[in-house]
Image (cartoon, rainbow, N blue to C red):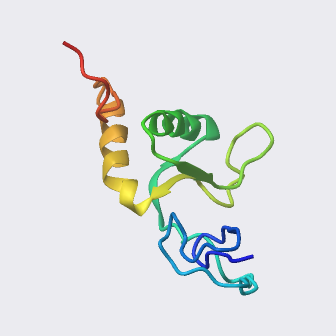
Amino acid sequence: MPFCPGCRTEYREGFTHCADCDLELVSALPEESSGERQPDPINLVKLAGFATVAEAEMIQELLEENGIETVIRGEIDPIGIPSGAAPIELLVAGEDFARSTELYEAYFAGEPVQDQSPGPETE
């Protein structure tokens, strides 16, 4: 059976090109090494530091409601207070930093924060 070397789809005999990738099909796929197909590393940057996990989670929720993925980093004890070894930090992808900062500052300025992505048009 032929295979697409791009998307790895198996085709029936008689096909010569992948319908999705438009690549020429091959008779066998090469073995995938563990180094292949690894996701691209994400450049995480610190948006802000917090005294408690609850504060970080509050901003995390705001950002994630606006489509920005986040990571909370830091050592905490069982009740959510930093252990003193590392502060609680909220990290975002580098490409989301500007939008995250805008939402973060608007939140603390008391401005309403809304997702500004295009939605359905209203008349």
Q: Does 35 sit above or below residue 80?
A: below
Q: Does 40 sit above or below residue 68?
A: below
Residue ID at (51%, 67%): 42
Residue ID at (32%, 47%): 99
- Among all residues in the image, which is located at the extreme top? 123
Q: Does 74 sit above or below residue 58?
A: below
Q: From the top left corner, tell me how far across and down residue 26 is, in percent.
A: 64, 84
Determine which quarter of the picture holds residue 10: bottom right
- Residue toward you, 4 or 89: 4
Q: Is residue 84 left or right of residue 61?
A: right
- Among all residues in the image, which is located at the extreme front? 14
Residue ID at (25%, 22%): 121
Determine which quarter of the picture holds residue 29: bottom right
- Among all residues in the image, which is located at the extreme left? 123
Q: From the top left corner, tell me how far across and down residue 45 is, in percent.
A: 46, 62
Q: Does 17 sit above or below residue 86?
A: below
Q: From the top left corner, tell me how far across and down residue 76 is, in percent.
A: 72, 49
Q: Is residue 55 left or right of residue 111?
A: right
Residue ID at (31%, 53%): 98
Q: Is residue 69 left or right of residue 38?
A: left
| Quadrant location of the C terminus in the rendered image | top left
| Quadrant location of the N terminus in the rendered image | bottom right
- Residue toward you, 53 or 113: 113
